[in-house]
């Protein structure tokens, strides 16, 4: 039996050989009594020529062939004439002269073309996902996803980690995002939940003595979706015993270095930079700073604290702050109308407005210039390292609003002004996170990461007196302004964990009901442990240079959590629900 | 900072070195003013000695230590005296003389001991799974599970397969086992289902042009559980385009050869034997024969068709058959009472009784001897190759009952009589399966594998006239009497698939409602494709020599689908259900 050869591997080495090819008709062209077919398989394309002198049968069959037909071709590899060489095509120096053609399966006219990256509506692409996925760019993305998980597994396997599987049918833990629930048929009125992460199980694996665990784990969150969220997503989940946070960060960055080398052939140098959370907020207005460009936030509260501009004064008096961005050399390029648009942009982040100044020669002009003394102007210019032609944009509000709005504005301007080198991979550890966040509405603390995070030892004495200022033994890994993931050391002593639940407002009874099994496990020889979890979908998105998370998931769901291909979710039969002891409530 | 060393790696090479160890107290012994602790970590055990001459502090701390305390020890590796060498312990030629001891975490007295494989009730083991998992045999099982998946992935990666993830939140397809359902919060009254397998998605991946897919995939079936079933289980899921069934079987057996070499250092020779389904049933009374021993079913219907023993005659006249097992040399070892117990055993499989004969010298004795002529006896002896001392056991009934009962009896006797070489790994392909099975109660055909299986080409003309005799292009892989998994070629042409749904009694409307997306995809250039799926849990069970599937799953569920550790499933809050538009029905 002849063995099939992949189209994309053919080249001059194969000239004069007879080959058997199988694949899809990418394109058919009829020209001067000949037929040319671009044959596509998973490896790429090759041109097949049907010539009446060589095989009239094959030519006649080729006349019936349409785009996306699945065919089998037997023929001879020949060199192309110099003038027909296609330098764009990898196999463009050769073609296959067909001796025989078999149609393996026909195809209706596809709803959109495969060879073009044309702008097809996403709903149509998702309904016909199996056609969309035939496109070269998606084929490449999923090859890269494969390579990425393969590199991660190889690294962790070689580092002594065991890959282990944790359950998908688990217990609902209301602390966190909304759970997907699964009614039990055996236990009346009871439900499983799909895991938001394997957090508790991986801690239990440490208590089981395995010491080094990982899993490429499916996780689920029933939340309203944004462009970068999916109801089910995949997490690189890691947990270790007896390691310090430094050791876990070292291991992780070695892993990422290996992945980038394997997948992108990019070298990143270690150790990765680290930045405390507060510094990230102050310099970049973000807990996941994109450090591929500058234009950092410049703090000027001290300079303008006594200015006659009420907005500045008011913000500072109310405990807030004033920052500026120096948009170098762009004063002349931003009209009032342009700046009005930036103002609308920052309002989305809660800012009330956007003050600005332009440095023109030795003058400083703009609506707020009149409120500033010469000394204030000079000090601003000096602090901002401003020069002729610079545009200064001001945020003045509660610090959280200033950071959020000016941090977002910085990113927007960075993109607009092409300040970002898209070939850079800028990793950054953000450390020294607050352990707790206070919810003003609910008047209680919530865990900033999750309620099993260990506080930094030197802050332990503040757990009762000043819980909001206790730092967590936690670390997030950021790449190019995206959070890839984060981790922490965990409470491994029962009294540590009890204390945290107490600060979070749990009664002992509530803590026991929800997490009793974990609390009990802490009393039977739990080792010091910690780990990290990273979003695989997002890593693939960044490595493949894509901006839509759905393009990194084989069969993604829409913003309303629907699968347009299979039409899920769907109706089920009454008997199915009866067996599960549930019924549908009316919508009201 | 001193680096921690794993206990189990210590040996004579380390003598006179100072080492830092971390782990669990397996055992503490006090002897003549000294304390001995067996320190356990993931690598194994080492003995630590606390000696007042060396460190009084460490000794005093050691006095407070109990089993399963987590400790850190610093000390010097020393050679043991000849008389204290422990040859059973891997590190038994050395011990560590402790200079310092820190208690990292305390432990209450565990509910059962780790060092013993004592017979603890399974419910208690599951509730304290994290303690159970510390036992050496389970540690080894999960290392083997890791090695098995690693070997499978390495093989498939190197063979050009892409690892791809299919959704867990999918559409309910009533054909098959019972689905686990997940109510949608966004789409009122609609439900997702957890996949029973990624069958349809992997076929869609082939239609997406990827050609070689695999996934170590979680699957779900809401069925009443037996010892070898779990509500969630893991499947090695493979699909390929353009490959013949022979090529898929070749690839699979090469993979299994690689796995056995990597994990067990066992060589298996290829190609694996193949046996048609009908032959397996006729020779072994089983579609998954254990070929590690003989004692095959011997068909004697022709010999006894006219005997005066009514049971034989009746079975044959009703279209059934008569078979015997020749239990070599066991006539004297099976009393009437023993045979009565075997009779009870076969009754479980629907047999009405168990006729028997003993060959004693040149005589044939037993209750049915008087119904047989000398010629019949001689023919039986000749056919059964029976000799003095053999026990002949007869099944006579509908063939399905004969196969089921005698096949099971064969296995039972094989174990009882130690006929099975437990070191053998006997693989076998079972081929030529029937495509359809007729359900007498429901008066319709069901797909024997699943409703996407392709019929054998030469049987296609029987699809209308004689569907029950159409063979499937399907193959199951059997190891030591267990079905590891199975696969098939799939229907890739719309009309093939339509025809199969028609024979299965689907209206066009029903087929479209449930599988419309697949039927449509078949019309847009679906390649010939096929694959296989194998149960990872069961493979690990067989490789690790275990008999309980739960021992191969990290956090398994009980027969009532409960997780005794986390207490799942559990109650959820009313708000959770309200958001999902479901409510609980009363139990009636």
Image: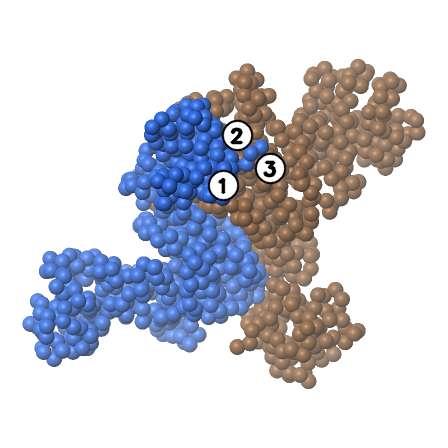
Chain colours: A blue, B brown
Tell me if A277 is positioned left or right of A252 in this view. Answer: left
Q: Position of residue A414 (x, y in %)?
A: 25, 61
N-terminal label among 2 and 3: 3
Looking at the image, is mark 1 or mark 3 nearer the viewer? 1
Callout 3: helix, strand or loop? helix
Is there one chain holding both mark 2 and mark 3? yes
Kind of element beneath mark 2 = loop
What's the residue at 33%, 36% (across, down)? A113
- Horizontal side, residue B587 vs residue B300: left or right: left
Separation (CA) of disc 2 from disc 3: 16 Å
Q: Name the residue under label 2.
A: B453
Q: Which mark is residue B553?
A: none
Residue at 54 percent of width and 26 percent of height? B455
Q: In this view, does A178 lie above or below B514?
A: below
Return the residue found at the far right: B361
Image mark 1: chain: A
Q: Mark 3 points at which residue?
A: B249
């Amino acid at each position: 039996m002849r063995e099939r050869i992949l189209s994309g591997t053919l080249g001059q080495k194969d000239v004069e050989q007879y080959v058997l090819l199988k694949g899809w008709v990418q394109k058919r062209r009829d020209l001067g009594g000949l037929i040319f077919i671009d044959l596509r398989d998973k490896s790429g394309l090759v041109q097949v020529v049907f010539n009446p002198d060589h095989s009239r049968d094959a030519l006649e069959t080729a006349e019936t062939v349409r785009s996306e037909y699945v065919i089998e071709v037997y023929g001879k590899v020949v060199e192309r004439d110099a003038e027909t060489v296609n330098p764009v095509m990898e196999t463009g120096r050769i073609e296959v002269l067909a001796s025989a053609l078999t149609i393996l399966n026909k195809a209706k006219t596809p709803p959109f073309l495969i060879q073009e990256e044309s702008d097809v509506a996403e709903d149509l692409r998702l309904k016909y996902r199996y056609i969309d996925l035939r496109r070269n760019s998606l084929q490449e993305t999923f090859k890269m996803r494969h390579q990425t998980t393969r590199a991660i597994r190889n690294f962790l396997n070689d580092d002594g980690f065991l890959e282990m599987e944790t359950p998908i049918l688990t217990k609902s833990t209301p602390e966190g995002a909304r759970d997907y629930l699964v009614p039990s048929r055996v236990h009346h009125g009871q439900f499983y939940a799909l895991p938001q992460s394997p957090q508790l199980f991986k801690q239990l694996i440490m208590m089981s003595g395995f010491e080094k665990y990982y899993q490429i784990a499916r996780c689920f969150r029933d939340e309203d979706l944004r462009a970068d969220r999916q109801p089910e997503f995949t997490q690189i989940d890691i947990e270790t015993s007896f390691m310090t946070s430094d050791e876990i960060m070292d291991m992780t960055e070695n892993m990422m270095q290996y992945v980038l080398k394997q997948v992108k052939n990019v070298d990143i140098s270690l150790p990765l930079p680290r930045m405390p959370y507060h510094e990230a907020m102050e310099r970049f207005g973000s807990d996941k700073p994109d450090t591929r460009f500058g234009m950092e936030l410049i703090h000027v509260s001290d300079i303008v604290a006594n200015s006659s501009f009420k907005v500045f004064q008011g913000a500072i008096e109310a405990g807030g702050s004033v920052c500026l961005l120096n948009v170098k050399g762009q004063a002349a390029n931003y009209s009032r109308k342009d700046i009005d648009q930036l103002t609308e942009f920052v309002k989305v982040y809660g800012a009330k407005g956007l003050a600005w100044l332009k440095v023109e020669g030795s003058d400083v002009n703009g609506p707020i210039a009149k409120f500033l003394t010469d000394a204030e102007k000079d000090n601003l210019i000096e602090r901002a390292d401003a020069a002729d032609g610079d545009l200064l944009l001001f945020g003045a509000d509660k610090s959280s609003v200033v950071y959020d709005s000016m941090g977002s504005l910085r990113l927007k301007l960075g993109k607009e002004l092409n300040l970002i080198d898209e070939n850079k991979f800028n990793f950054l550890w953000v450390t020294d996170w607050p352990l707790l966040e206070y919810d003003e509405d609910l008047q209680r603390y919530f865990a900033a990461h999750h309620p099993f995070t260990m506080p930094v030892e030197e802050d332990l004495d503040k757990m009762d007196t000043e819980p909001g200022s206790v730092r967590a033994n936690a670390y997030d890994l950021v790449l190019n302004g995206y959070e890839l993931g984060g981790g922490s050391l965990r409470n491994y002593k029962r009294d540590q964990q009890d204390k945290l639940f107490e600060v979070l407002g749990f009664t002992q009874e509530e803590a026991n009901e929800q997490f009793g099994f974990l609390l009990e496990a802490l009393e039977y020889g739990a080792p010091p442990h910690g780990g990290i979890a990273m979003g695989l979908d997002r890593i693939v998105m960044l490595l493949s240079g894509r901006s839509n998370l759905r393009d990194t998931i084989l069969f993604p769901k829409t913003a309303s959590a629907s699968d347009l291909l299979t039409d899920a979710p769907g109706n089920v039969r009454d008997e199915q629900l009866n067996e599960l002891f549930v019924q549908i409530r009316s919508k009201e």
